[in-house]
């Protein structure tokens, strides 16, 4: 019997499949599988050694297999003879609990059992830089306030339009592309969807952006703060909760058009924010974005306190429209699967405990933040965030004890590696002491 992938290949002229999974650090891992072998691997999966990726395993662990989710296969718009298919990791016949996609699927299933379906959209900002990573790729992109700069956008038309055309061909319904607040920075938006669909698309988007940039002799980076003086790369997530076709966050009579369900969900997110930071802002460099001094444009566009508001971009949570939130904390290094997973975990706790988000603030937090005297500060460093996450029993239990323990172990190794490195700043300021 012909499998789904073989039929897909025959209909579309595909010769190879990338059997893919995303590890705990957010790196994408794949094997290139010819169509002739795809039928067998569609059932059994492609084999990987877990220790070779960012998972908490050793060389003694048996093979794990990425079993493809054939409903999510995507043909590469820039190389149509290849298709990408995300997989769920299995070892010894059991799901690998450390796998981020497995984690998200389990939380989605838990929410469904409670009658909830989370939908989300992401705004994945990135810089187009020189191939060697030394600076932005457009030497004429020098405005102090370059956001929406038409000329700078059009000088990168070939790259941006090719990516947007790719999204169109994949059926994502992209609707706008713009030059962002930093020189060399761009954002491209597509329609929101179910959490797992958006996560798969987010993972593929990063792959597509990097690949197309390379084809044009450039390099794309989602690094949170690649340049000290410029605005960093955020990854804002817009979230709503649904029951069938009914948006449970929407209440026209509620404050800002938000329902009691929305307030309780938001209460959970705000309650757990500091612990969530280890996931939403997962690398050392992340904390140079959310705790940054003012950039040359005049604003960092990133939060450093736990506050929410209406349509006010100086807060961590913004309400841009009735029936949804925008969470502005996460950055470009975030794992596409763990971002919605941790957000859903915190929100479900808010619903279970009927948590109160407290009153909204309508201050300009960049100029009047000192007036918000009870606003909690975000962690200043990755180490602080890891420790807070490790003490949060609710989030760890919701995500899963195994994935949480593995995540903490890998993040502590990352912090230790950073701590052992000697920076240029240290040498500059300390050689003559």
Image (cartoon, rainbow, N blue to C red):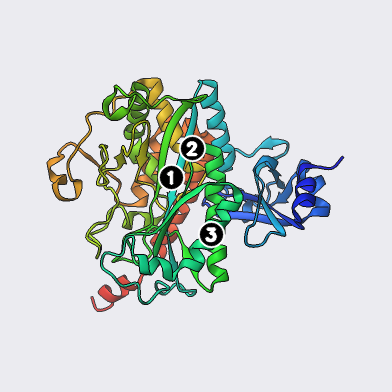
For marks 3 and 2, the one nearer the N-term is: 3
> Who comes first in sequence, dot 2 or dot 1?
1
Q: Which class describes the residues within 10 Å of circle 2: few (<14), some (14-19), or many (20+)?
A: many
Local SS, label 2: helix
Q: Which mark is residue 341?
A: 2
315 or 285, nearer to the observer: 315
Q: Residue furthest bottom?
A: 432
- Under circle 1, the secondary element is helix
Residue neighbourhood size for the residue with mark 3, other residues' Cα within 10 Å, grouped as few (<14), some (14–19), many (≥20):
many
- In the image, is 339 to the left or to the right of 100? left
Q: CA distance from mark 3 to mark 2?
A: 27 Å
Circle 1 sits on which residue?
Answer: 279
Q: 10 Å neighbourhood of mark 1: few (<14), some, or many (≥20)?
A: many
Q: Residue at x 28, y 48 (%)?
A: 303
Q: Secondary structure at mark 3?
A: helix
Q: CA distance from mark 3 to mark 1?
A: 27 Å
Quarter of image, res 289? bottom left
Whichever of labels 3 and 1 marks the residue nearer the N terminus, that label is 3
Q: Could you say which is closer to the camera, residue 77 or residue 397?
A: 77
Q: Cβ–Cβ below 8 Å for labels 2 and 1?
A: yes
Q: Residue at x 62, y 55 (%)?
A: 29
On residue 163, the disc is 3
Mark 3 or 2: in front is 3
Nearer-the-camera pick, 433 or 39: 39
Query: Where does residue 230 sit, x and y in percent of width and height?
Result: 31, 64
Vertical order, 37 against 238 (above or below): below
Find the distance from the CA under tag 2 to the CA under tag 1.
10 Å
């Amino acid at each position: 019997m012909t499998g789904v992938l073989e039929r897909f290949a025959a209909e579309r002229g595909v010769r190879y499949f990338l059997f893919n999974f995303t590890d705990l650090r957010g790196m994408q891992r794949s094997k290139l599988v010819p169509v002739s072998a795809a039928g067998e691997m569609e059932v059994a999966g492609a084999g990987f050694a877990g220790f070779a990726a960012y998972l908490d395993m050793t060389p003694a662990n048996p093979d794990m297999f990425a079993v493809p989710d054939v409903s999510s296969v995507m043909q590469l718009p820039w190389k149509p003879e290849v298709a990408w298919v995300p997989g769920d990791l299995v070892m010894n016949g059991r799901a690998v609990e450390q796998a981020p996609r497995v984690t998200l699927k389990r939380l989605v299933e838990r929410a469904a059992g409670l009658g909830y379906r989370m939908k989300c959209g992401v705004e994945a900002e990135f810089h187009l830089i020189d191939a060697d990573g030394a600076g932005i790729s457009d030497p004429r992109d020098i405005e102090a306030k370059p956001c929406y700069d038409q000329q700078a956008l059009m000088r990168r038309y070939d790259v941006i339009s090719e990516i947007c055309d790719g999204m169109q061909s994949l059926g994502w319904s992209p609707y706008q592309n713009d030059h962002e607040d930093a020189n060399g920075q761009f954002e491209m938006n597509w329609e929101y969807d179910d959490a797992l669909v958006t996560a798969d698309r987010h993972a593929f988007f990063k792959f597509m952006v990097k690949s197309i940039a390379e084809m044009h002799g450039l390099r794309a980076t989602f690094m949170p703060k690649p340049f000290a003086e410029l605005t960093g790369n955020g990854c804002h997530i817009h979230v709503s909760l649904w029951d069938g076709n009914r948006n449970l966050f929407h209440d026209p009579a509620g404050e800002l058009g938000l329902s009691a369900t929305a307030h309780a969900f938001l209460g959970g997110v705000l309650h757990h924010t500091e612990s969530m930071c280890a996931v939403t802002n997962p690398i050392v460099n992340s904390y140079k974005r959310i705790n940054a001094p003012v950039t040359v444009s005049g604003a960092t566009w990133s939060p450093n306190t736990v506050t929410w508001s209406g349509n006010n971009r100086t807060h961590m949570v913004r309400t841009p429209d009735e029936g949804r939130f925008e969470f502005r904390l996460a950055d470009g290094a975030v794992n596409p699967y763990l971002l919605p997973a941790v957000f859903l975990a915190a929100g479900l706790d808010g619903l279970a405990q009927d948590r109160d988000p407290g009153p909204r603030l309508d201050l300009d937090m960049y100029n009047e933040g000192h007036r918000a005297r009870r606003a909690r500060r975000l962690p200043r460093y990755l180490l602080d965030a890891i420790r807070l996450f490790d003490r949060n029993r609710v989030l760890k239990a919701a995500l899963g004890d195994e994935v949480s323990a593995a995540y903490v172990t890998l993040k502590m190794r990352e912090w230790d590696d950073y701590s052992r490195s000697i920076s240029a700043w240290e040498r500059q300021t300390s050689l003559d002491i």
